[in-house]
Image: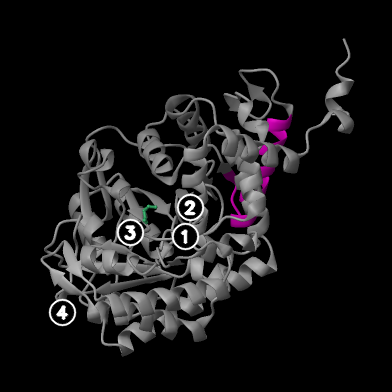
Amino acid sequence: MTVSAHSDARSGISVARLAERGADLLRQEDPDLHAILDRENRRQARSLVMVASSSVVDPSVLACLASPVVNVTAEGYPGRRYHAGCAQVDEIEQLAIDRARRLFGAEYANVQPHSASVANELALSALLRPGDVILGMDLHQGGHLTHGSRASFSGQYFQAHGYGLDEHGRIDIGAVRALARRTRPRLIICGATAYSRTVDFAAFRSVADEVGALLLADISHVAGLVVAGLHPNPVDHAHITTTCTHKQLFGPRGGLVLLGRDATTPVPGGHGSTLAEAMQRSVFPFFQGAPAVNVIAAKARAFDRCATTEFRDLAARIVDDARALADAFARFGYRVVSGGTDNHIVLLDLTDTGLSGLVAQNALESVGILVNKNHVPGDRRPASVTSGLRLGTNTLAVRGAGPVDMPTCARLADRVLRAVQPRGDRDFHLDAGTAEQVSADVAALCERWPLPRYPADDLACTTPAWPS
Ligand code: DSN
């Protein structure tokens, strides 16, 4: 039997035609779903997105996600699959692995985790036993659910202790060391979701070494800055580094595990297994089955884009924008947690304004400005309400907004936050005049900063792009 037809270009299906066919079928056969997706496209184009965990994937990344490679079942790893038909999938996954290793200077990369949370789960499971002590940044101080919060497996299966910020809003490594000496963790987690300052991975490693702990660095929020050399790279400091691929790597929703010089370090109590071997087994077959190969292709594409000088320029703009945004909010009288920012995050403490984070978030969303409510240090409100706002500049920067534009963005938000009348912690009234004026200004800015390389006709729609 010959398989030559499979490699004949004439028998292939063009990616563009397939996408067009899919869109046509969706429009004809499922107009309800098509209309929702269409509205979502327009909402994104017409919103001023300052959600710190958001970014915008390139259309070429979207093309990978929509590729028929999604049809392939491919349990295992390149060259060692449990299913036939994986030749291209092997090439794709190897490309993604090679690109990830090059990007971060890593010895080992695993591109299969479905998310950074899963990457953290499988790392903790591979290295610890239930009941072991872990130390991570407290969720209310800027840490992540998977860093030891009682609301997640990490705080339920392990005995978790949390470190926080000092009176200047910084991680006090001396306090972390003292806590580590007292609690003797088997694993320390560094990295955060709402911390605007640089994380000193070398200092964390010295604490880990002193108490005989492993160190996990979760760089989900700052991975792009790491790639661009604008934040220290943890790969050779931490025993394990995890990240998602959608925030600052501008890729698909997914996770990534990286190991540096400790890739060949034996796992304590691991019967001779190295960290690399343990992580490889923990991803598959322990935690996951068949990987999402279309997502892996999209990761490979995103990693390639992150290796460019244009990406380094973008990363620099992200940081410059955040600094300018923090300065502008401070000038408007807001309390910026940590006194400013070294990365893309600006955390505002609204305690003195009388607004809850929820009211502020919803009032801003009503005019097309998207941020998220967030706990701030000392917050007494529940996580569903909070007293703070977290903003980020990934999306503004990729749409072309620069530091000179940040006072405009802050002023628009300030106009709403000054005008809004809270009715308790959950409801509010915003006068129609302010809502209309700010909405129009937001629309004009979004038109000035179209989604990069997206077809511009998304903006032509007159349907409101956000809830009124
Ligand atoms: N980790 C959450 C955040 O930072 O918003 C979700 O990505």
Decide which of 370, 251 is in the foreground and name it.
370
For disc 2, the marked residue is 39
Magenta highlight: main SS: helix
For disc 4, the marked residue is 352
For image coordinates 44% across by 53% down, the residue present is: 238
Q: Secondary structure at mark 4?
A: helix
For disc 1, the marked residue is 463
User: CA–CA distance between discs 4 and 3?
Assistant: 36 Å
Badge 4: residue crowd in 10 Å (few <14, some 14–19, many ≥20):
few
- What's under tag 3, amino acid-wise? Val
Which residues lie in the magenta part?
Answer: 88-108
Tag nearer the camera, 4 or 2: 2
User: CA–CA distance between discs 3 and 2?
Assistant: 50 Å
For disc 3, the marked residue is 207
Residue at the bottom extreme? 331
Q: Earlier in the sequence, mark 3 or mark 2?
A: 2
Marks 1/2 in contact by CB < 8 Å: the verdict is yes
Check the picture and name the quadrant holding the C terminus: bottom left
Q: Give the percent coordinates (x, y) of residue 416.
A: 29, 77
Q: Quadrant of residue 427?
A: bottom left
Q: Earlier in the sequence, mark 4 or mark 2?
A: 2
Marks 1/3 in contact by CB < 8 Å: the verdict is no
- What's under tag 1, amino acid-wise? Thr
User: CA–CA distance between discs 1 and 3?
Assistant: 55 Å
